Amino acid sequence: MFEENAQEIFLLKLGEVVLKGLNRRSFEDKLVSNVCRRVRRCGSFNVYLRQSTIYVEPQNAQCNMAEALTACRQVFGVVSVAKAVPCAKDVTAIADTAARYLKDEFAAAKTFKVESKRADKLFRLNSIQISQQVGGILAERFPDVAVDVHKPDLTVYVEVREKAAYVHAPAAPGAGGLPIGMGGRAVSLLSGGIDSPVSSWMMARRGVELEMVHFVSPPYTSQQALDKVLELARLLTAWCGRMTVHVIPFTRIQEEIRKNCPEEYFTLIMRRFMMRLAQTVAKSVHAGALVTGESLGQVASQTMLSLGVTENVTDLPVLRPLIGMDKVEIIRLSREIGTFETSILPYEDCCTVFTPRHPCTRPRLEDVQAAEAALDVQALMDEAMAGRTRVRVKP
Ligand code: ATP
Ligand code: MG
């Protein structure tokens, strides 16, 4: 039933999903469909779930396994991905398969052990017996590699499951978190900076499906600046899947604020407009929250009082996953998720045009509201929304 060179497959372990009690079914279904969608562009795969493990099996030799492995590791809700080969449920077959599949690993190792799991409780040996017997055969096969159950160079994993036994080498870590779609939908304010791609990624990892909003201020901001943001969104699609970026013109609003409001409140009033517009987008796409890359104390507009004044214009929860993080930690994450190099390309963001010399760090809501009264807020909003364009971004 199993040929000499049985196809390599992937076994995906689920994370928190396993703990979700009654919701477990819908979490698992969501995760399977997310994995399915993500590996589709790497070839034809059969994806299914058995006993809290997702199996990803290539259907033909044209499948790009390296790409599919990367894709699986970027699906939120997956804690680890192991390459494995199936074989018959019999200790000799398992040992033969391990010897063949892991021959390079055995050549490089001085010590090894076998670690077994028996998911099929009807199998006649328990996990310790499987390890002992398979280990015994392998020890004979590789006399130069000694058994060491404490600190082996190589651990051979064996799983005896429903359909077959599987042999695999150590698993690679997955993205963790919860499957996208299980955490609701939110609108994320995406700038070209380092922070907001990371905040978007963090909320997506909690299962939140994102729509992006980006504000542009031509001619103060360039086409390259917008392209950079779209590229950041594209980089995020590797983790989040396809998404929409709502591009909203912001020039008129900024010019009107500069003309009519005290300079010290410029940034705060501008940020209040961003929140209002993002909320309008959120309502139009049935999103339940806003996401920003704000971090407490990072700049004048991110003091506690400033954040309070900023979010006062929206009744949606404002999620700020970076709020308690240091910049070095944010940068480390940004490198890990692959957005850093693009984020540091030097293009103007609308936030960096017209910045006040002395921004207010201890604003009072009434003062900001009074300053804002010089503007026709609704008319400016309507004009900005009328100029909105939507860009679909795909992996
Ligand atoms: P980032 O590094 O993400 O640009 P920042 O530390 O530079 O953030 P600000 O420029 O004050 O901080 O912006 C704070 C947050 O406001 C950003 O993280 C982002 O969520 C949002 N934001 C700023 N500029 C824009 C923009 N042009 N379009 C959409 N959202 C923006
Ligand atoms: Mg910025």
Image: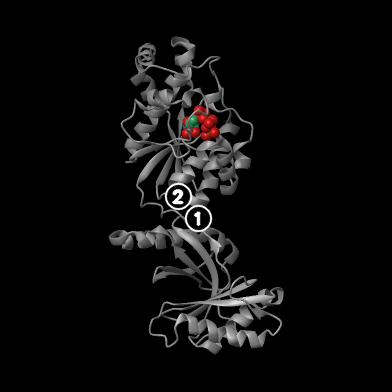
Quadrant housing residue 372: top left
Q: Position of residue 284 (x, y in %)?
A: 33, 37
Q: Position of residue 115 (x, y in %)?
A: 53, 76
Mark 2 lies on a secondary structure that is helix
Residue 303 in sight in this render: yes
Mark 1 lies on a secondary structure that is loop
Q: Which mark is residue 76?
A: none
Q: Amino acid at mark 1?
A: Ala
Q: Is residue 171 left or right of residue 308?
A: right
Q: Is residue 132 above or below residue 27?
A: below
Q: Amino acid at mark 2?
A: Arg
> Looking at the image, which is closer to me, 35 or 378?
35
> Looking at the image, which is closer to me, 340 or 154?
154
> Looking at the image, which is closer to me, 37 or 333?
333
Count of marks, rendered view: 2
Q: Is residue 271 left or right of residue 152?
A: left
Q: Which residue is mark 1?
A: 175
Asked if the residue at tag 1 contacts the one at tag 2, i.e. Cβ–Cβ closer than 8 Å, the answer is: yes
Q: Which mark is residue 205?
A: 2
Q: Is residue 125 above or below residue 288?
A: below
Q: Position of residue 362 (x, y in %)?
A: 44, 18
